Image: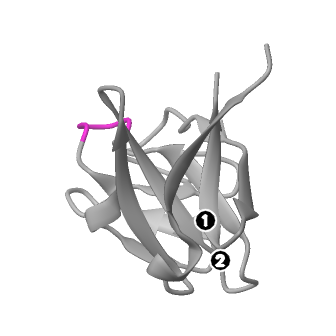
Amino acid sequence: MAASWVEACAADEIDEEDVIRFDHAGRTFAIYRSPDDDYFATDGLCTHEKVHLADGLVMDNIIECPKHNGRFDYTTGKAKGAPVCVDLKTYPVRVEGGKVLIGLD
């Protein structure tokens, strides 16, 4: 199934190595900007206790959950150790005209 592209934010709204929260159609997403100026999107809630990841710490392509310090690689969604053990879902991202778009299925 082809992705439906949704405008999430302005590209300059996210600093390098930062994350923002984006809510759409009853779902929460986290959108990241890497040190290499690439953009990524994952589900916005930690798979451990459903805490908003946008309140977490971003460093070296890792998002650290603010509640129990669980970590995920935000480029792949992979859980990186306890207490998280379930990966995050990732979404395609593209930047057009200064806007960040995420692909939803």
Q: Which residue extends farthest top? A: 1
Q: Residue at x 23, y 37 (%)?
A: 49
- The tag on residue 34 is 2
Residue at image location 71% in from the left, 69% down from the top: 97
- Name the element at disc 1: strand
Residue 28 lies, in percent from the top left, at 35, 39
Q: Secondary structure at mark 2?
A: loop
Quarter of the N terminus within the rendering: top right
Q: Amino acid at mark 2?
A: Ser
Looking at the rendered structure, the kind of residue marked 1 is: Lys
Q: Which residues are magenta?
A: 46-50
First in residue order: circle 1 vs circle 2: 2
| Image quadrant where one finds the C terminus | top right
What percent of the width, then of the height, locates residue 39?
Answer: 67, 66
Q: To which residue does mark 1 refer?
A: 99
**Prevailing SS of the magenta stretch:** loop
Tell me if residue 78 can be seen: yes
Residue 28 lies within the magenta run = no
Q: Is residue 86 above or below residue 60?
A: above
Seen from the viewer's position, the closer of residues 45 and 4 is 4
Q: Residues within 10 Å of mark 1 (few under 14, many from 20)?
A: some
